[in-house]
Amino acid sequence: MRTEERARGTSAEQRRARLEELLRAYGPGSRPASHGRYALIGQSETLVVLERMETNPFGLRSEWEKELETIFLDDLEFAWGPRIRLSR
């Protein structure tokens, strides 16, 4: 296996573990979710939003603010814990 392929595999494994933890901590049935927060976690669309959060966070925030309530993105951003915080 080439180094690049191993790196992709390791990255995918790390993301999977991180996604599993996100679902356990904030997903449906969790204490935070029972209070009506973190509504996006557990939705299939969340995978795309997380990918954008990692690759184009400022573009995501800019487009999001045009169409949707920012509290949903803020909650997801907090739960995912990206390197760059975009919320105010």
Image: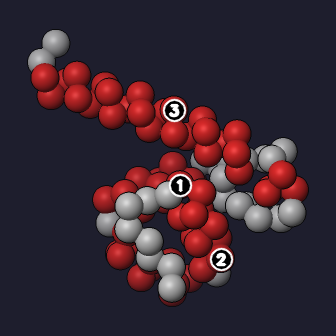
Label ID, residue 71: 2
- Circle 3 SS class: helix
Q: Which image quarter: residue 5? A: top left
Q: Earlier in the sequence, mark 1 or mark 3?
A: 3
Instruction: Where is residue 9? Give x, y as percent.
Output: 31, 25
Badge 1: residue crowd in 10 Å (few <14, some 14–19, many ≥20): some
Label ID, residue 80: 1
Closest to the camera, between mark 2 and mark 3, is 3
Label ID, residue 69: none
Instruction: Where is residue 36? Give x, y as percent.
Output: 83, 65
Q: Which residue is mark 3?
A: 17
Q: Earlier in the sequence, mark 2 or mark 1?
A: 2
Residue type highlighted by circle 3: Ala
Distance between mark 1 and mark 3 Cα atoms: 12 Å
In the displayed structure image, the side of residue 35 where residue 12 appears, left or right: left
Residue type highlighted by circle 2: Ile
In this rendering, the answer to whether 75 lies above or below 43 is below
Do labels 2 and 3 touch, CB within 8 Å? Answer: no
Q: Residue furthest left?
A: 2
Tell me, yes or no, if residue 42 can be seen here.
yes
Q: Residue at x 16, y 12 (%)?
A: 1
- Circle 2 SS class: helix
Q: Residue at x 50, y 79 (%)?
A: 87
